[in-house]
Image (cartoon, rainbow, N blue to C red):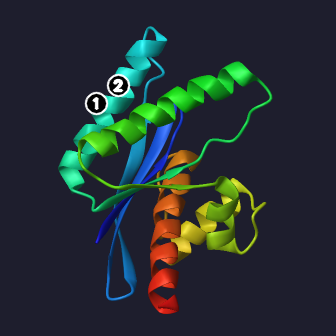
Amino acid sequence: MVILGIDPGLNTSGYGVIRYEKSRIQFISAGTISTAKAKNFSEKLEILYKTCCEIIDDYHPDVCAIEETFSNVNPRTSLKLGHARGVLMLAGQMKECPIYEYPATVVKKSLTGVGSASKEQVKYMVQKMLKLQQLAGTLDVSDALAVAITHYNQMRYKMLKI
């Protein structure tokens, strides 16, 4: 099974693709979707949507896992992030890729055992779990891979529970 993890953002969204077979996870790809040079808000949303569709077409994930948004101090920022997250979810839906949502605290706890772990701690655990010497890119990339690993852990737990 192939899992696409997404860390949504308006200017930079991270994505990470992993595969799991026989209780083993394997790194496939990761990167960012950058909209920083777009001229206006709707153009940024279009870039997010189209690029996410391309990623889905390239890697054919069986599921998409996306981090839930948290409330910022600035409600306008939260609203814009919600729009970005919405178009990323729409891309998955339009490509018939089931979408699962995870709060940041669940993602952090799934990888580190602590729901308030730092982004650096999450990155360290992503590298260890995927057996990567280095992980290029921003913390958005490691966060996206962490979301994908969280979905893997959730599926594994549910399979063990049955």
Q: Residue furthest front?
A: 162
Vertical position of residue 9 compared to residue 93: above or below: above
Q: Residue furthest top?
A: 39
Residue linked to disc 1: 50
Q: Position of residue 40 (x, y in %)?
A: 46, 9
Image position of 107 (left or right of 89): right
Q: Out of 89 and 30, give the one closest to the viewer.
A: 89
Mark 1, residues whose alpha carbon is within 10 Å: few (<14), some, or many (≥20)?
A: some
Image position of 75 (left or right of 147): right
Q: Position of residue 48 (x, y in %)?
A: 38, 30
Q: Out of 76 and 15, give the one closest to the viewer.
A: 76
Vertical position of residue 62 compared to residue 144: above or below: below
Give, as a three-letter code, the residue at label 2.
Answer: Ile
Residue at image x 66%, y 28%? 78
Q: Position of residue 124 (x, y in %)?
A: 62, 67
Residue at image x 60%, y 71%? 125
- The quarter holding residue 111 reads bottom right
Whether residue 131 appears in this view of the structure is no
Q: Out of 127 and 19, give the one closest to the viewer.
A: 19
Give, as a three-letter code, the residue at label 1.
Answer: Lys
- The quarter holding residue 112 reads bottom right
Q: CA distance from mark 1 to mark 2?
A: 5 Å
Image position of 2 (left or right of 140): left
- Element type at mark 1: helix
- Element type at mark 2: helix
Label placed on residue 47: 2
Residue at image x 73%, y 23%? 75
Q: Quadrant of the N terminus?
A: bottom left
Label placed on residue 9: none
- The quarter holding residue 126 reads bottom right
Residue at image x 40%, y 38%? 88
